[in-house]
Amino acid sequence: MEYKHIEYFIEASKHSSMSKAAEELFISQQALSRSIANLEDELGCVLFYRSSKGISLTADGEYLYRNFAHKVEEFNLSIQNAMRFLLHKRHSLH
């Protein structure tokens, strides 16, 4: 399981739309759908109900979302903070 698959899953969950999530992630809808399908295969479950009106989480998807959403946000925030710190440190040396 790759981190980006979890990140993609979280983004799709937030938007209830593969196309909107793909836009936010700067990837094609096909790439996002493939990534979600790979994650579902790896986990052995279906994460989304799919319809012409969009997507919604299954019970398994809701469980995964509840367990990972805050961790993904925290991880991304940690990366941003580290980058700001290092940028500030680099500028203070000059």
Image (tube, grey):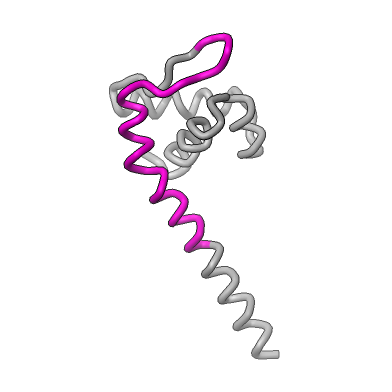
> What is the chief secondary structure element of the magenta stretch?
helix
Q: Position of residue 23 (x, y in %)?
A: 66, 33
Furthest residue to the bottom? 93
From the viewer's perspective, is 12 left or right of 58?
A: right
**4 falls in the magenta region:** no
Q: On screen, 91 above or below 32?
A: below
At horizontal 48% and vertical 14% (from top left) the residue drawn is 50
Q: Nearer the viewer, residue 54 or 2?
A: 54
Q: Position of residue 83 (x, y in %)?
A: 57, 68
Q: Nearer the viewer, residue 23 or 52?
A: 52
Quadrant (top left, top right, bottom left, bottom right) of the N terminus? top left
Q: Where, by quadrant of the figure, is residue 61 drawn?
A: top left
**69 falls in the magenta region:** yes
Quadrant (top left, top right, bottom left, bottom right) of the C terminus? bottom right
Q: How many marks?
A: 0
Q: On screen, 69 above or below 16?
A: below
Q: On screen, 4 above or below 59?
A: below
At horizontal 58% and vertical 13% (from top left) the residue drawn is 53
At horizontal 52% and vertical 31% (from top left) the residue drawn is 12
Furthest residue to the left? 44
Q: Nearer the viewer, residue 37 or 88?
A: 88
Furthest residue to the right? 94
Q: Position of residue 91 (x, y in %)?
A: 68, 83
Q: Position of residue 88 (x, y in %)?
A: 63, 80
Magenta segment: 51-79
At horizontal 52% and vertical 70% (from top left) the residue drawn is 82
